Amino acid sequence: MSNAHIEAQRVLDEADCLHDHAEVEAALARMASQITSRLADQDPLLFCVMNGGLIVTGQLLPRLTFPLQCEYLHATRYGKETSGGRLAWVVKPTEPVKGRTVLVVDDILDEGHTLAEIVRYCREEGAAEVLVAVLVDKLHDRKAPGIKADFIGLEVADRFLFGFGMDYKGYWRNAPGIYAVKGL
């Protein structure tokens, strides 16, 4: 067993469970209902933001019982600075967004710089409307200017989170609830 694996297990064992699996499932059901009410007649294009959005999107899609197209994209900011808002595209969107309603699904809205740039990109490519759905909206005042989520599963305190798509050093995206690292 690697030191990273041992550390990851210790972190989960000591973590605070902020929302258990049942609470996450209820949040996903609420989000799906809101999204369905808003988008069922829109022929939306859904983008799963990799890697964090994978679990949320996988749990959300079967609850959206209307026609939609689903794609993925993978974008990361490079460096720790946020000025300039540049993205490094690992996988750019391949489906045209011009004239479409786009729903961007991610695990968390923390500071939101990457999400803001994805939304900007979709608008510049001609999307008729761009909406954002996140499982977790972290409560603090450091959000990128103008970024907000249209569909939110849970609001969570400003702590280092993992589970349901969010990771701790690459581990525990698969944790069945929303956890906060003890002491962070």
Image (tube, rainbow, N blue to C red):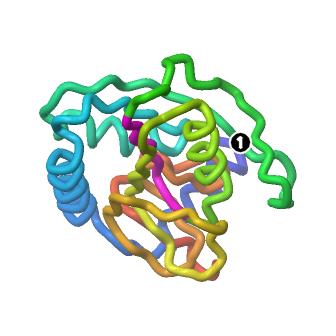
Mark 1 falls on what kind of element? strand
**Position of the N terminus by quadrant:** top right
Identify which residue is drawn at 26% across, 28% down. Answer: 43
For this rendering, which residue is in front, 19 or 95? 95
For this rendering, which residue is in front, 121 or 170? 121
* Residue 133 picture location, percent across and down: 39, 52
For this rendering, which residue is in front, 156 or 48? 48
Which residue, given by chain and number where applicable, does mark 1 sit on?
76
To which quarter of the image does residue 177 belong?
A: bottom left
* In the image: residue 116, left or right of residue 97: right
- Residues shaded magenta: 101-109
Q: State whether residue 104 is above or below residue 19.
A: above
* In the image: residue 66, left or right of residue 35: left
* In the image: residue 9, left or right of residue 103: right
Q: Is residue 103 magenta?
A: yes
* Residue 183 picture location, percent across and down: 63, 82
Q: Is residue 129 magenta?
A: no
Identify which residue is drawn at 60% across, 43% down. Answer: 118
For this rendering, which residue is in front, 2 or 71? 71
Q: Amino acid at mark 1?
A: Thr
* Residue 114 picture location, percent across and down: 65, 50
* Residue 74 picture location, percent across and down: 61, 32
**Position of the C terminus by quadrant:** bottom right
Identify which residue is drawn at 39% across, 41% down. Answer: 103
The overriding secondary structure of the stretch rendered in magenta is strand
* Label 1 crowd bin: few (<14), some (14–19), many (20+), radius 10 Å: some
